[in-house]
Amino acid sequence: MVSVLLVVLGFFAGLLGALTGIGGGVLLTPILAIHFGIPIRQAIGTSLVAVITTSAASSSVHLQRHTTDIRLGMTLELATAFGAAVTAYLVGYFNRSALEGLFAAFLLYSSFTILKRGGKVKPEETLATEANGKRNGGQFSIPAYEPQRYPLGLSMSLVAGAMSGLLGIGGGPLKVPLMYIFMKVPLVVATATSNFMIGVTAAASAIVYYRRGDILVEVAAPLAVGVFLGSLLGARVAPRINTRHLAYLLVAIMLYLAGSLLVHLFRGGLA
Amino acid sequence: MSQVREPAFDRIVALVLRTGAFSCFFVMLAGLIVGFFTKGRLPSDIERAGVLLMLATPVVRVMVACYLFFHEKDRKYGFISLGVLVILMLGALFGIGEH
């Protein structure tokens, strides 16, 4: 039965996402398009639901550790939500091949970024702080900071939001370095805040996709159920697993999906 | 100082998100289970309710944060939250582009 298969697919995407820090949307959209024959625009809209589920579940954990900067997140959300809503609306006028091509390019880019970092998906500092937090019984010591360069932060958030609305992704790989490097926010806070923002950003575009009929509820529901369970399990086992092998597995899957999308594209687009 | 130092604020927002995620999960799961036993509109209506609940969760999160900011007399961030809320609402009101 298809819905059981979708629960299983969501489960593994959620698990891999929680373990490697790469959101499930990146994998789900192309799998839905290639293996379930769902047009890519609806695949994007449908996996956005799973993206919101993951963000809600995981950022509630970050919030309880008090590592999320709600004020910074809310401010940048002005830009991400706006960018996401605008591109989500524009996607209605994109043709399928353009979206497939963009998505394939995004998958290739993400794979090369992970490979360049030698399979480290999470930067060292996050790991160190996380280990520290565990020693102190879940309390994180965050150095005092003041976010810098809001104009730059807002304009890059607009781009991150636009990418999110276009491809149905969270945009963490763009927002975390933005906050950490340019806005001088500690890495733990940047990671937690990026995660926090994903829910609202994805909702801004998902609402537009929904109105256009681009969210297939009978696909979204089993996927989200699986993703929810997978990310819960992933968050529990994450500290005991060598993420480097998983990162290479992820790269292999992403390269395969990018290749399949490109094949579709040049054959005239099956999906 | 932008850094959050209000545990109660974090806890309330976390509660909103967790309630949203868990209730969606159970509603969608119910839809799936019902779908195994009956055919027709019921299962997909339940699943639709779950999806809508999921889309509403971030919106409610912004509403709650907005209320909390104004309650704390932090008007600047209250208005920022209100701005985010307006953007989310615009998407819901102008669902143009239907083909």
Image: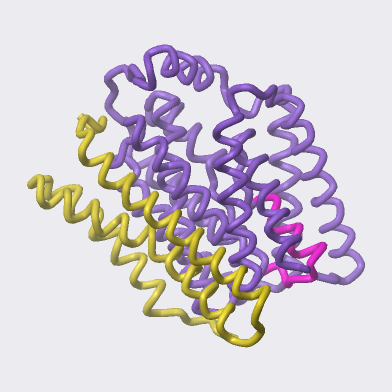
For the point 72% across and 54% down, the residue is A9
Q: Is residue A69 above or below residue A256?
A: above
B45 sits left or right of A79 in the view = right
Q: Colour of chain B?
A: yellow
Q: Colour of chain A?
A: purple
Residue A30 occupies which quadrant of the picture? bottom right
For the point 43% across and 12% down, the residue is A135
| A31 inside magenta stretch | yes
Quadrant in which the C terminus of chain B appears:
bottom right
Q: Is residue A140 above or below residue A195?
A: above
The image shows residue B55 at horizontal and vertical percentages of 44, 65
Quadrant in which the N terminus of chain B appears:
top left
Residue B21 occupies which quadrant of the picture? bottom left
Residue A8 occupies which quadrant of the picture? bottom right
B8 sits left or right of B31 in the view = left
For the point 71% across and 61% down, the residue is A6
Q: Which residues are magenta?
A: A26-41
The image shows residue B87 at horizontal and vertical percentages of 34, 65
The image shows residue A105 at horizontal and vertical percentages of 74, 50
For the point 56% across and 32% down, the residue is A236
Q: How is the image coloured?
A: by chain
The image shows residue A3 at horizontal and vertical percentages of 71, 66
